[in-house]
Image (cartoon, helix red, strand yellow):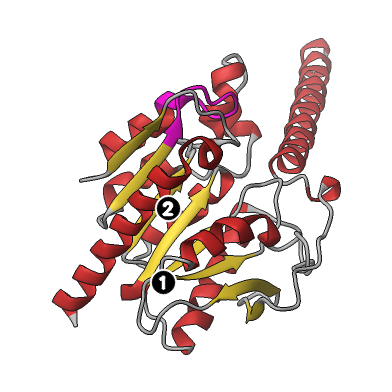
Amino acid sequence: MKLAKNLRRTTALFAFLSFSAATAVVGARAVSRRFVFPVGEIEAIVPPREVARLEAQTRDGVLVHSLLIPGASNAPVFVYFHNNRQTMVAGLALARDIASRGFGVVLPEYRGYGLSRGAEPSELGLYADAEAVLDAMNARGIGRERIVLCGMSLGTGVAAEMARRRRGAALLLIAPYTSLPDVVAAVAPFLPTRLLMPDKFDTLAKSPDIRIPTLIVHGDHDEIIPFWMGGRLARSITGARFLRVPGGHHGDLLARAHDVILDEMTSLAASVCCTSRRTG
């Protein structure tokens, strides 16, 4: 009788501890998602009227907005996936620089951000948004053979996933990470980051499946994403070119190496042109 009573108590205690642990994990994962996608802190900026827009409907019903700057006829088109604290408008200055070299640019805006307020952001949600934008471009006659997938910081994970899915002909990663749990583990190695973070964006794991011309740009003084992560990805993606920006921080790479980066982007786009001619 006493044994049965103690067993019941032990079972109840174990159930309580399990519930408490599960609740803590769920809460931590929710906090993690708000940290990765701080949409409540980001002002929705209305894009300039003169910039064309592209709308795309995702398979789960979200209306995704993008800005579109046309390039020369049949020229490569850069699809720029922005940072987690930006909207599509933040990429306009770079987009105009790219367009000045004859290329087209599309600036998608993730769900939950700016004008694309139809759903809460998540890793799978951002992939769905990117797929919808690329499908809309394909419907306009801009196929994968003309597309340069480009990401900045958080957006590198989206661009890399689209490259893994064969949705572009070249890939540009600016200040990339190996995975988001790795970024957190770099500053808090004691945390079980892969358990606590629902959004992994594990680019390193996908790197063997990326087989298109790739350029990686990283500043060696990056205070957000460790510089070694860019180098690790460059070694993991076959044939990737690595551009180190001396003294570069997370948000000033273009200011420090504007012309060099644009020249490298132009060379990357040229590889798309060559690939298109070979496969056309």
**Helix, strand or loop at disc 2?**
helix
Residue at 85% from the left image edge and 49% from the top image edge: 40
Drawn side of residue 269 relative to residue 105, left or right = left
Drawn side of residue 141 relative to residue 118, left or right = left
**Helix, strand or loop at disc 1?**
loop
Residue 102 is labelled as: 1
Q: In which quadrant of the rendered image does the C terminus lie?
A: bottom left
**Residue 42 point in image, percent of width and height:** 81, 49
- Residue at the top extreme? 2
Q: Quadrant of residue 230?
A: top left
Closer to the camera in the image, 12 or 210: 210
Question: Quick check: 171 above or below 194?
Answer: below
- Cα distance, mark 1 to mark 2? 24 Å
Query: Badge 2 is on which residue?
Result: 160
Closer to the camera in the image, 160 or 14: 160
**Residue 205 point in image, percent of width and height:** 37, 41
Question: Earlier along the polypeptide chain: callout 1 or callout 2?
Answer: 1
Closer to the camera in the image, 16 or 213: 213
Question: Quick check: 107 above or below 229?
Answer: below
Q: Which of the two discs, 1 and 2, sits closer to the camera?
A: 1
Question: Quick check: 103 above or below 263?
Answer: below
**Residue 101 point in image, percent of width and height:** 41, 66
Q: In which quadrant of the rendered image does the N terminus lie?
A: top right
Can residue 225 be found in the magenta stretch? yes
Kind of residue at disc 1: Gly
**Residue 206 point in image, percent of width and height:** 36, 47
Q: Residues within 10 Å of mark 2 (few under 14, many from 20)?
A: many
Can residue 76 be found in the magenta stretch? no
Q: Which residues are magenta?
A: 218-228
Residue at 49% from the left image edge and 48% from the top image edge: 156
